[in-house]
Amino acid sequence: MESAHPLTDVFQYVDDHKNKFVESLSQAVSIKSISADPELRNEVNKMMEWAQAKLKALGADVELCDIGQQTLNEKKVQLPPVLIGTLGTDKSKTTICLYGHLDVQPADISDGWASEPFVLTERNGKLYGRGSSDDKGPVLGWLHAIEAFQNTGTDLPVNLKFVFEGMEESGSIGLDELLIQKKESFLKDVDYVCISDSYWLGTDKPCLTYGLRGMSSFFVEVEGSSKDLHSGMYGGTVYEAMSDLIYILNQLVDVKGKILIPGIDEGVEPLSEKEKELYEKIEFDVDAYISEIGASKSQKETKEELLMSNWRYPSLSVHGIEGAFSGPGFKTVIPRKVTGKFSIRLVPNQIPSRITEIVKNYVQSVWEKRQSPNKFKIYTVNEGGNPWKTDPFNDHFLAAHEATKTVYNVEPDYTRCGGSIPVTLTLQEVTGKSVMLLPMGAGDDSAHSQNEKIDVRNYIKGTKLMAAYLYEVSKIKH
Ligand SMILES: NCC(=O)N[C@@H](Cc1c[nH]cn1)C(=O)O
Ligand SMILES: [Zn+2]
Ligand SMILES: [Zn+2]
């Protein structure tokens, strides 16, 4: 007879407490912790305090660390604190550092949500709400997994160190410095680092993530006048800021996604035959991917080209224009000042500060060609995020592989991710230990988009996966 898995009670507890765990996610989602909006800083602070109370209730030693201020539009704004915590100090146990973020991207029902973004709403086995998948659901998954160990009298087989921040969606400002400062104290005994803040490639197959892109983001400001102008009264008489801006934005990337900035491929690793084969083997349905987002055609010709463009090559996206009229109907106005926003995802070996310099020089040269007398500025508000990639063939990934088999009954895929988590490389460098990303969410979760959701299945099985991961890592001999 096959013996029961040592975590049978833990898994049962998670199943039995599904409603309680959904309620806890609902509370977290209701806090509008949008880090990009300085007016909502109190909400981010509230979110950090909410999580602090949760960690405390699990018996962790916790601290909200002050990381100072940021400068936004020439004003100083207090940064939300970073929540750190320690649970267990048993020298005979492995110590795992868990990182997650509790801030979210902006969201408003008028963006096209089917239900209020800050009210967790269940429809057809999916929990809709901003942060449900990125990253409140996964953070809560860890806390619920620990609760399941504790409330079933199952020994938590590892020591834990928590690092939860409230600025990830805005470049993790201030976090690197804190972690570097804590290298020889709080982070000293860490053996492994695990982050649950990425997604499966598709909707059915669990994945382990071994690479992320980095990011540099830019603001391009053009100012033409001291007030908005009637386009009938002034059209044809003035240099228009918006036309200048569109001219610049149009010279960043072509229709096939090729970045037009000379030198932008600096540092990109050459593609080896071995790596090419890896892409060929990945199960990925391009048509399903394109149809799920309601697009008409993939920009890339093949599965391999698409995945490589997302994971191993830089890409440039234009996000928006502040100051431009965007309401319904027609407003015949010439905006006085407009700020275009774009970002470049960076890949391993690329250095954000170097790419920032290349981009600024290029945009400045484009501006000079324009010969406009308007005021122009290109600037960044953070130092950018580093890319990260690791070799996934080690005991740490193997432990997560085993945990995935236990919970999902399948072997996970090994994937990279086109998104960025700026602190990943820092955690690897500061601890000197293996970092792994263990995603909870599925590829169609719509993170950052309208109707972000997490499937109840992923939320509950993902919590069991976290418990199984902690158990499997505790068995690694070191
Ligand atoms: N789940 C990770 C994630 O969404 N990260 C953000 C990070 C970011 C946003 N703005 C600046 N950094 C991402 O867009 O990849
Ligand atoms: Zn995000
Ligand atoms: Zn995230």
Image: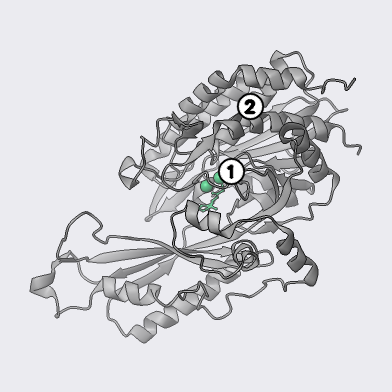
- Residue at the spot of label 1: 442
- The label on residue 33 is none
CA gap between label 2 and label 1 equals: 20 Å
| Residue 52 picture location, percent across and down | 57, 26
Mark 1 residue's CB less than 8 Å from ligand 1: no
Residue 240 lies left or right of residue 447; in this view the side is left
Reply above or below: 89 against 236.
above
Q: Is residue 221 visible?
A: yes
Q: Secondary structure at mark 2?
A: helix
| Residue 326 picture location, percent across and down | 25, 57
Quadrant that contains the N terminus: top right
Residue drawn 74% across and 68% down? Answer: 276
Residue type, label 1: Ala
How many neighbours does mark 2 have within 10 angstroms: few (below 14), some (14-19), or many (20 or more)?
some
Q: Secondary structure at mark 1?
A: loop
Mark positioned earlier in the residue sequence (2 or 1): 2
- The label on residue 143 is 2
Residue 77 lies left or right of residue 315; in this view the side is left
